[in-house]
Image (tube, coloured by chain):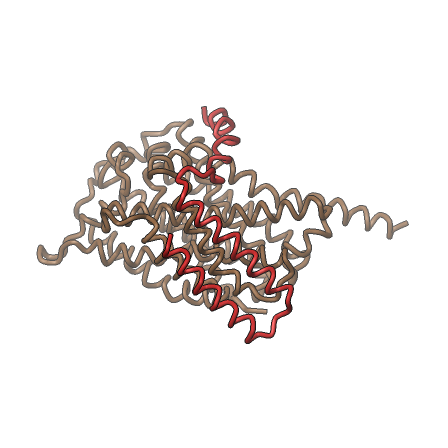
Chain colours: A brown, B red
Amino acid sequence: MEQVSQNQLLLLFILFTFSTLIGFGANHLIYTSQYDSFLVLCISGLAEVIFAFFVIKLAKRRPNKFFAHYGKDILPTWIHIPVMVLYFVSFLQISALILREYEDFIVQTYLPRTPNWAVGVMFGIVVAVTARLGFENLFRIAQGLFYLCILANIGNLALIGKELQWNRLMAFITNHSGHGIYAGSYFLIPIFGEVLVLLFIFPYLTQKHKTMKSIIWGTIFSVLFIGINIVWLLLLFGPNLTSHLTYPMLEMIRYVRIADFIQNLDHLLISIWATTVFIKITVVFTIAVQILTQLLGLKDHRPLTFSLAAVMVALSVNMASGSVDITNFYTQSWATFSYCLEAIPLLYLVVDTIKQAAKKKEHGR
Amino acid sequence: MILIILGFLFLFGYEWIYLKNKNRKKRTYWIVFCIMGASFFYCISTALFIHIPSPVDLIQFFFKPIQQKMIG
């Protein structure tokens, strides 16, 4: 079995939440929650920790077995197999969705008139090759890239400092909306709930008893890093302009100018950020491949990676006619679907607890 | 279309050599190439027909009304 350390898990989880939320979700979060965005982030972080507690509780009961295998012992096979197929399709769909968002971003900003499939194929090949290498290598890549990404982000925030409108700080205390907090949390909690992937990578972890601690620290750092970026966006553009920008982070990065002679640093910083998106897509895609491998009873996931990567790219191109459709999907139904997906392990946990209690009662007699 | 066919031909050869080197069972060959075939047909159909239903349509159909009610 491959070995992933708790430190690697912690760093990956920070990048995992940071990547897409900052790149693609910031405008919608600010649109719904405005100056309450940071509060919403804290609520979502808390929800992530509570959810992770239950996921870890379930995973710890059979620490060296895969969910696809031991799920049959909890729920009947005729329920468990369709559930795993649902997870396989959903993870493939999530990786395709993030890939599509990345394709749209690249095509709209840096490669105009390039077809989406061209960007998708290039990215898909890299994802497939990395997924073929397995989780251990993927976590090592994330560990290496983490410091680079966070340094670039901190540098960006420091350089933008003088452009900020500090008088807007008062609005964080005075401007609140109950509905904004509710709607923002409803949208954001499922994104933090992607900690669900822990259930599928648990057998790879070393020092499993420290997992909860890693998740708590990972959540604190994620909320902190994302929160600072969101606050900076609000102080720089204000809530109205930020929510109408397609990629507010890109616009913020474009404000960076060093000593009037180093300008347009966005290419450098965006290329560093793109690696975090690559990591997220690869993690989700590898989980999809592993679920299918375990369901089919294969020894090795490698021969399936390229075929499924082709499906992911085709799905990403086919899923919508334009970026507006993707935004609609993301804002109109994605969160509710994610809640359903993330509630399934809780059902397994409840059934398993009832079964264990019944067994104990029988033994007691 | 030609690119898809060429890509999958290369993939077929690559995976065949990989499975042969690892001395995999006949069952593994069947599974791997059936999935590759399904992947090929999906890619070809997305290239030929633009409006193939995707999981996104299904998710929108079921969950959009619920989310509208939840958020208001």
Q: Residue at x 60, y 53 (%)?
A: A56
Q: Is residue A315 left or right of residue A26?
A: right
Q: Position of residue A283 (x, y in %)?
A: 47, 57
Return the residue nearer the eye: B43 or A172. B43
Q: Position of residue A123 (x, y in %)?
A: 36, 57
**Given the current orientation, which residue lies at the most extreme left position?**
A260
**Given the current orientation, which residue lies at the most extreme right position?**
A365
Q: Is residue A142 left or right of residue B25?
A: left
Q: Quadrant of residue A68?
A: bottom right
Q: Position of residue A29 (x, y in %)?
A: 36, 37
> Is residue A104 positioned above or below B68 on the image?
below
Q: Is residue A228 visible?
A: no
Return the residue nearer the eye: A93 or A215. A93
Quadrant of the image containing the N terminus of chain A: bottom right
> Is residue B70 positioned above or below A16 on the image?
above
How many discs mark residues in the rendered view?
0
Q: Position of residue B41 (x, y in %)?
A: 48, 50
> Is residue A132 positioned above or below B20 on the image?
above
> Is residue B44 positioned above or below A66 on the image?
above
